[in-house]
Amino acid sequence: MELIFVYSIIAYSITNVLVFGSIFQSWRDFWDKKSPKFFGKLFSCPMCLSVWVGFALSLLFQHFNIGTPMTLIGMSLPINYTIVMLLTKVFLDGLFVGGIVWLIHNLEEMFERLGS
C-alpha cells in the first residue's frame, strides 16, 4: 500500500513541476509555439500530462523491477510476457496516475478556495 502512495506522490510531483514550475516555463513556451494544439495543451494540463507521466513511470519502474499500482492489484507480468501484456499494464498505470493526479489537484484547489 505504501508503494501506491509513494508512486502517486512521485507522479503528482513530476506533473506539478512540469505544468506549474517556473523552471519549466521556457520549455512550456517553446512547445506552445511549436505545437500549440498538442504539446502546448499537454504541458498546461495536469490531467493530460499526468497520464503520460504515468506511462513513463510505469516503464521506468518495470525496467528496474519495482512494483507499480497494477502490480499491487495482482497484474504482475509472467516471465514470458508479451508486448501486449506490457502495454496493457503501462496503459492502466498511466490511467491510474491520471486519476490520482486529478484527485490531488482538485483537492488542492478546493482547499485553496476554502482558505480564501
Image (cartoon, rainbow, N blue to C red):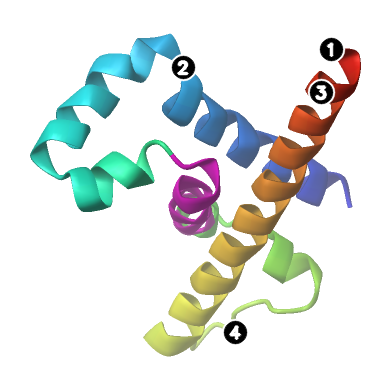
According to the image, label 1 marks what residue? Answer: 116
Q: Horizontal placement of 95 versus 52: left or right?
A: right
Query: Percent from the top left, x then y, of residue 67?
Result: 68, 58
For the question of whether residue 80 can be seen, the reply is yes
Q: CA distance from mark 3 to mark 2?
A: 21 Å
Type of residue at label 1? Ser
Which of the pair 105/94 is nearer the observer?
105
**Image marks 2 and 4: residues in contact by CB distance under 8 Å:** no
Q: Is residue 53 magenta?
A: yes
Residue 108, image quadrant: top right
User: Spatial distance from mark 1 to mark 4, Cα to Cα?
Assistant: 51 Å
Task: Give coordinates of residue 22: x percent, y percent.
Answer: 41, 10
Residue 92 painted magenta: no
- Residue at 45 percent across and 30 percent down: it is 19
**Proximity of marks 3 and 1: CB atoms separated by less than 8 Å:** yes
Read off the residue under disc 2: 21
Of residues 32 and 11, which is closer to you in this image? 32
Q: How many marks?
A: 4
